Image: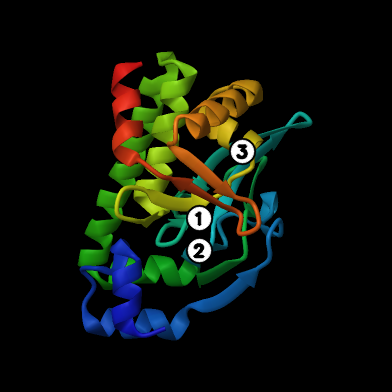
Amino acid sequence: METQAIVELFPLFSAANPETLEWILSVVDEESYGQHEEIIKENDWGKAVYFIVSGWVKVRSRYNHQETVLEILGKGDFFGEMEVLDESLKYIDVIALSDVQLLSISAQRFLQMLFKDPQIHHKMLQLSVRRVRHLYRRFQLHQQTPKIKLIKTLMKLAEAYGKLMEEGAEILQIPDQDLADIADISLDECQQIITQLQQQGCLESDSSRQVLFLTNLKQLNHFAKQI
């Protein structure tokens, strides 16, 4: 990967100086995973930070024989940094939702990178604050109706990782249970709302390509405000 490509793909590196970028490219490893493959096991946290070049992953909690999807991440995002900077998580793993291409950097090299370039260190703080703000917004949705929760979840995924089109966006066709988990609604509610949105012309699915089309973001935004 060229330095310009890594800057365009990952906001964390947008302010890095050229020497740091060259160094980063010299120490990262390229990794590939197939759909449903485990990327990080429970005991692997804290060893490296992973940057998503392509594909989608889910961060999953497995505790007391129950599984819950905590987050879904896509191209341009990264994970594992909190466990390098602080205590490793327990009962959490990361699974590929599609074929995934990653860049990984060891914990030691990641910390070196933060000390090496103050601009990256500052950007890391900004992105960490953004993650906290996102969690706060998800908490604010807790009292909203299931339809608002699901619509705003779909729009967030589209805006963060989707392929934008003239009136809508294309995202991965995420399994219903995973989508229900991150929207904090039941599976039945999720499936019923998806059917409603399809009937209203706001969603289309292509199972052969495992793609979900948000065909009218403007209308979805209107629903979210009016419900």
| Cβ–Cβ under 8 Å for marks 1 and 2 | yes
Give the Cα separation between the discs numbered 1 and 3.
20 Å
Residue 47 appears anywhere in the view: yes
Q: Viewer-nearest of labels 1 and 3?
A: 3
Which residue is at 36% across, 32% downward?
A: 220
Q: Quadrant of residue 156?
A: top left
Please tell me the numbered disc located at residue 2: none
Give the side of residue 177 with respect to residue 120, left or right. right
Query: Alpha carbon of mark 2 to alpha carbon of mark 3: how far?
Result: 21 Å
Residues under numbered marks 2 and 3 in contact, where contact means CB atoms less than 8 Å apart = no
Percent x, y for residue 141? Answer: 39, 22
- Amino acid tagged 1: Gly
- Give above or below for 201 relative to 46: above
Q: How many numbered markers are drawn?
A: 3
Q: CA distance from mark 1 to mark 2?
A: 6 Å
Query: Sequence-wise, which precedes: disc 2 or disc 3?
Result: 2
Specify which label sits upstream in the sequence, 1 or 2: 2
Q: Is label 2 in a helix, a strand or a loop?
A: strand
User: Horizontal and vertical percent for residue 1?
Assistant: 42, 83
First-in-chain label (1 vs 3): 1
Residue type at mark 3: give it: Asp
Disc 2 marks a residue whose amino acid type is Tyr
173 shown above or below 208:
above
**Coloration mode:** rainbow
Label drawn at residue 80? 1
Mark 2, residue position: 50
Is disc 3 placed on a helix, strand or loop?
A: helix
Density class for disc 3 (Cα within 10 Å; few <14, some 14-19, many ≥20) is many
The residue carrying pointer 2 sits among few (fewer than 14), some (14 to 19) or many (20 or more) residues within 10 Å by Cα, namely many
Kindly identify which residue carries mark 3.
178
Looking at the rendered structure, the secondary structure element under dot 1 is: loop
